[in-house]
Image (spheres, rainbow, N blue to C red):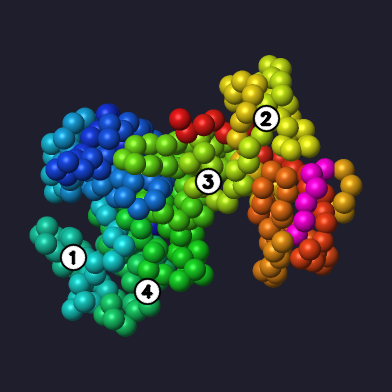
Amino acid sequence: MSSDLGGQAASVRFENVTKAFGDVVAVDGISFDIEAGNLVTLLGPSGCGKTTTLRIIAGLEMVNRGRILIGGRDVTLLPATDRDVSMVFQSYALFPHMTVIENVSYGFVVSGMRKEEARTRARQGLELVRLEGYDDRLPSELSGGQQQRVAVARALVLEPEVLLFDEPLSNLDAKLRRRVREEIREIQQSLNLTTVYVTHDQEEALAVSDKIIVMRNAAIAQEGAPRDLYERPSNVFVADFIGDANLVDAEVRRVEGETASVAIGTVEIELPARGIAPGPAKVAIRPESVRLSDPGNGLAGQIVKAAYLGDHLEYTVATPVGELFVIDNSVGAPRQVGSSVSVGFGARVALVPSDD
């Protein structure tokens, strides 16, 4: 993918930023760094503060305390018009009476650029999102995915230091979401854009991000690479929120160096200790880590639910440590509801520090 577009990517830094609306604290003293050229996702449940954080970067909300730096420049007191950022909204925010080319070139035209030059730049943006030849169509003549790509092109052509996405795929169906998110990631990487992306969809966040910042109750619950958050959640909330996890009571029997011997019912396995001392503990067991076999060694279990999903089977298994949700790729050998099994565990099991 080639284009003449591409501004100077800039880092983003939050230093102890707080934003309140009256008595409601939406963002509570958060600090983080986003490296230039990275795509970082703000992820969390509704009301956690992620969209407010995005709007603070954009300059659409002013903070009560703290500092915001973009490219090392303090922009805390600057309005949106004086920040070199562009935002792609959930609702697309296209002008319905304007053609595609008019929508994409709008920012240039209002800033005084000659119309033909503005259209040339706009066509570069449309080429980047694979909408060549759609210049004269109205938004109403486009699919939802095409409208979203027009909105992306409109933001890209301004060559911002930081590109912001506010739940950009939530209005699209599942297959289209996957395709458009892949296109967004490809564009971001090819242009080396600093991008901040808000979503409540965990799969979307895992698929597109260099780093994920998980937010909860106006604060940061954990930040890190997608694999780190999935395989080494730092608390019960993150373990439960990022993907599916079986959260099970266990006991740390002993710790030797960085390794802990952990008993999950009658099964003892070795896991990274993560600073957890011997005694009662929680483990997060990913559904694909649960291994089912015929009765014998392992944790005794019984299939209580079974579902065929084409490329895998999903089971609910009753065990002495509680019901476990299991993803099994052995579609050719389904297990029947009521049958007895032995339960073992693979690699994706993690000791999880308490939320307290």
* C-alpha gap between disc 1 and disc 2: 61 Å
Q: Earlier in the sequence, mark 2 or mark 3?
A: 3
Which of pointers 2 and 3 indicates the residue nearer the eye?
2
- Residue at horizontal 41 percent and vertical 40 percent from the top: 213
Q: Which residues are magenta?
A: 298-303
The dot on residue 251 is: 2
* C-alpha gap between disc 3 and disc 1: 43 Å
Q: Give amino acid for label 3.
A: Asp
The reply to whether residue 339 is visible in this rendering is yes
The residue pinned by badge 4 equals 144
The residue pinned by badge 1 equals 106
- Residue at horizontal 71 percent and vertical 65 percent from the top: 306
Q: Give amino acid for label 1.
A: Tyr
The residue pinned by badge 3 equals 240
Quadrant where the C terminus is found in the figure? top left
Q: Nearer the viewer, residue 96 or 122?
A: 96
Q: Position of residue 81 (x, y in %)?
A: 14, 49
